[in-house]
Structure formats: C-alpha cells, structure tokens
Amino acid sequence: MLKGIAASSGVAIGKVYKLETPVINIVDRTGNPAEELAIFENALAKTISDIEKVKERAAGNLSEEELAVFDAHLLMIQDPEYASQIKAQIEGGACADKATKDVSDMMIAMFESMDDAYFKERAADIKDVSFRLICNVMGLVIPDLTAIDEEVIIVAEDLTPSDTAQLNKKYTLGFVTEIGGRTSHSAIMARSLEIPAVVGTAGIMSSVKNGDVIVMDALAGEIILNPSDEERAAYEEKRNSFLKEKEALKVLKDAESISIDGHKVELAGNIGGPKDVQGVVDNGGEGVGLFRTEFLYMNSEADFPTEEEQFEAYKSVLEGMGGRKVVVRTLDIGGDKKLNYYTFPEEMNPFLGYRAIRFCLDRKDVFRTQLRALCRASVYGKLCIMFPMIATVKEFLEAKAVFEEEKAKLLAEGIAVSDSIEIGMMVEIPAAAVLADEFAKHADFFSIGTNDLVQYSMAADRMSEKVSYLYQPLNPSLLRLIKMTIDGAHSQGKWCGMCGEMAGDAGAAPVLLGLGLDEFSMSATSILNARKIIRSISKKDMEELANKAISCQTEEEVKELVDSVLNH
C-alpha cells in the first residue's frame, strides 16, 4: 500500500495508464549518412501523420479556429528549409537525433529573439513540433491523453492544468500523482470534473507499470497495488457505500442554505468553463462563485481567445445559470499556469511575479478584449466581475477604469450592456486583507482566495511537499485575516464570499459561518455536504466558536474546537 493525499473524493479500481514524458538524452555520435537520413525521413513522415491524427481526434471538441493550430504545426513540420538544414547536417556526418535537435534549437532561439510579439510566441509552436519530431527520430513514445479510449487510472509524476483539462471523464476513473497537494491546480480540476484523485503519492511512478491493476481510495488517500480478490471486493463495497451516501445528499438539492437559527448564506460552485455549469446546477448550486477564465486561454492552442469566442462562453454560462449570480474572475495566468502561445519572462519566483492582474494591466490589449466580451454577455444573466491578485487600491482602480472605458465604448457603439454588473476583487494577498475596509469603499464585493492567501501569509509554496505542513487554513493568523476581510466588506455594506478550497472544507464551515461569510463557493461536488452542515448548526453558536478560534495559538486547537461542534 502507498499513502498519498486524498485530493478529490471517490474510490476507483482499474488499469494503470502511466503518463511519462519522454526524456531527450542525445549522445553525440558519428552516423552513417544514408542510414541516418532514412531514420530522419521515416520520423518526419510519422510526425506529419501523428499531427494529422491528433487534429482528427480533436475535431469533435474544438472550433475551426482552435483546430487551425494543427494546420500551423503541419506547415512548420513540412517546411522544406527546416528539413533541408537537418539533412545537410546529417550529410556532414551528424546523427539524425543531434542534427534535428541542433537545427530545432537554432530556430527556437531565432524566433525567441525577435522583437515582434507574434513571431516570438511562435517559438512555443516550434518547440511542440520539434519535440515530437525528435521523439520520433529517437523512437520515444509521446503520451496523448486525448487518445485514451478505455477505462484507466492515470498515474503521473504530476498533471499540469492543461493535462487535467484534457481528461475524458468517460474513460478516466481517477488519477494518482507522485507530487502535489490538495490545492494544486490538478487537484482543483479533479474536484471540478468529479474525478477521484490522490496526489503526493511518493514512489507511485517506480511502483507501477502500464496495465497493472490498482485500487485508489481517494477518501483515505491510499493506493493498493494489484489487489487480491478479497481487497478488490472490500473496496468495491466501499465505493458503493460512498456513491449511496452521495446519492442520499441529493434530497438537499433544492433546500435553502440556512442555519437552524434562520441565518441564510449562499452556496455556489467553482467552474472552469461552460461544460461545468450543469454540475453546479445538478448539485444545487445557488450561483457560480468563481469562473476560472484562464482555462479558455489555456485550451486555446494558437493565440489568445478572440472576443467572440469569449463572449459565447460567458453567454453560455450566464444563460445556463438561469439568472443566478455568476462571478467571473478575469484572466489569472502566470505562476504554474502557462500558455502554449505566449512565453512568460523567466523569474526567480513566478508566483510572486508577473501574473494575474499584473499581466492584464501590462497587456491591456488582452484585458480589454476580455472585458468587452464580458460586457456584451452581461445582458444574459446576473454578472459579477472580479480582478485577481489585487495588492493595492491603485491597481483595483486602474482595472476598474479599464472596465468602465470598455463599457462606455460598447454603449457608444449601440451595444447593450447591463447596468447592474458588480465589480469586485479577490482577496488573496495579506496586504489587501489588512486594508479591506478601504478597498470596500471602491469594490462591490470581495471573494477570498484562501489557496494563495495561505501561501503568501505563511511564505510557503503550496506546491512544495517539504513545507506542506504550513498549509494551515485554520491557523488563527489566517482566521484573523479572513475576519478583517469580512468585517471590512460589511463596514461598507458589501458582501464577502470565499472561492478558495477552504470554502468547501467541512471542517472550516462552522468557523466561516461564525465569522460572517456571506457566500461559500466550492467544487460542485462539495455543495450538498456543505449545505447539510450549515443546516445542522446555529449561526449564534458559531459566532462564539469563531471568537474562541481567533484567540487560539495553533491550528490544532482550532480543529479540536470545530470537532467538538461537529461531533457533539
């Protein structure tokens, strides 16, 4: 048995699909030109065929514009100049793999050094294409998650947000990763997709091979390798019990989120795109508290998504929620969230660098396109827009001014825009929490992003397992920052929500209710359990609990307080 961190609830039993990215390790050797040319020509033909197959498989899920990236890749790989330079090096005595790598690196460096942003960003396309070609020259297999056509449990070192976005729920029973934590983006996406996940499972990659059968218990964070018949039967029973309990919660789908002494809160869902809306509705969500728009950008292969593409996505979500509130977070890219078509500057600590609102205020062309699309979509529902990673009042006012400019332009063009759009901000930087009462004079609402608020408050990278013990959302210091934020909002008559993972944590709900949180936004699958807890406790009693909690010294003391309430 291997132990990991239960990141997305469930139990799964199935065959292993081991996701391994090939390692390019080129040994300089002298090759026979005729043989090496044949290796290159075969690899070139296979690469062209591979790209055509990927395009064919993607045709059902992507628009014509999105599919165009594959046409661009085909043009690159079939560029006579590219192939002739590689062949010239081979004819000069270089082996096929080294010649391909050297010419590719030269082309990538050339594009990266260009002043024109469009051509500079094409370097990422060349990297993709040349990586596939080099792998084919060397006989290495490139995994393709979109090609999975049978039920499997994916085992990987880690899954990038882009990897997770490609997962097909029909065939992905769950996934297990070697690294990561509950707040890693892959874990968050797994909860959104309702796919069981166990992360931070040290040794899993060296312990399994493709085709092995494993049990993943994403309730206890345990992995059983090649289970016996008895173990398999026991976990099948555990899986069935979990599914029955999940089904039993559905009676609360249309119930109010109201405490036993009559205090009502709002339970909303976090989504990554239009396809996630149905999950929020099916789980009784009273709105969308976080629409992570970065996935529209990450899923766009060729370039930043157009205004029209974004408008259609936002319109779809607003209509799908049928007049219920939808909080859209503007582009939150950077850190560990990358784009295929844009290269971020190299930074010592990208999580503290050029990302989120900092990127948008620098690249106002990208920002304005998104804001125009949002304004146009606003007439189809109840839209709230929030800016991520705000650190200063000046940043917020600058972002809000850009919104007002784009709204005014659209109205001048005769395009309808709702006059009731709320403009708010994420509170995920301690400086913003401390100054919440001043921010609340300008913002219509706050949404607390606890994943980053914990990371920045504790100076602990949430992706680092060595300091994962510092991920303590119930630490009294964090609770005081949360109280400052909620009190700051309420001092100006504004509402305060939370869209970080803490909002869906059953162990945090009593304290957050007591602190006065107005809206809890979480993975759709957590909503009904949260509603069950809210309906079983008293707001007045929880205020007393919260006052005790912020006076504690350690998270352990807070957890003991909460346990005494939930288990009495």
Image: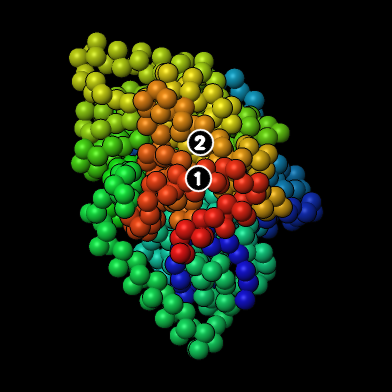
Q: Nearer the N terminus, badge 2 or badge 1? A: 2
Residue 282 horizontal side relative to residue 25, left or right: left
Between 212 and 397, the one nearer to me in the picture: 397
How far across and how far down the image is residue 352, in percent? 63, 32
Confirm whether residue 393 shows in the render.
Answer: yes
- Location of residue 115 in the rendering, given as x and y in whole percent from the top left corner: 59, 19
Identify the residue at the far top of this view: 412
Q: Secondary structure at mark 1?
A: helix
Query: Amino acid type of disc 1?
Result: Ala
Residue position marked by numbered label 1 in the rendering:
546
Which residue appears at 47% of the width and 83% of the height?
A: 234
Q: Residue 262's x, y, as percent? A: 29, 47
Residue 12 x %, y %: 46, 72
| In the foreground, 194 or 346 | 194
The answer to whether the residues at label 2 and label 1 have Cβ atoms under 8 Å apart is yes
Relative to 307, is 95 above or below? Answer: below
Q: How is the image coloured?
A: rainbow
Q: Residue at x 57, y 71 (%)?
A: 222
Residue 300 seen? no
For disc 2, the marked residue is 483
Is 462 placed above or below 373 here? below
Q: Count residues near mark 1 (Cα–Cα under 10 Å), then give few for <14, some for 14-19, many for 20+.
A: many
Tag nearer the camera, 2 or 1:
1
Q: How many marks?
A: 2
Q: Is residue 224 above or below residue 161?
A: below
The crowd level at tag 2 (other Cα within 10 Å; few <14, some 14-19, many 20+) is: many
**Residue type pointed to by label 2:** Lys
At x 43%, y 80%, the residue is 236
Q: Is residue 33 above or below residue 430?
A: below
Where residue 150 sits, quadrant-wise, is bottom left
Q: CA distance from mark 2 to mark 1?
A: 9 Å
Q: Secondary structure at mark 2?
A: helix
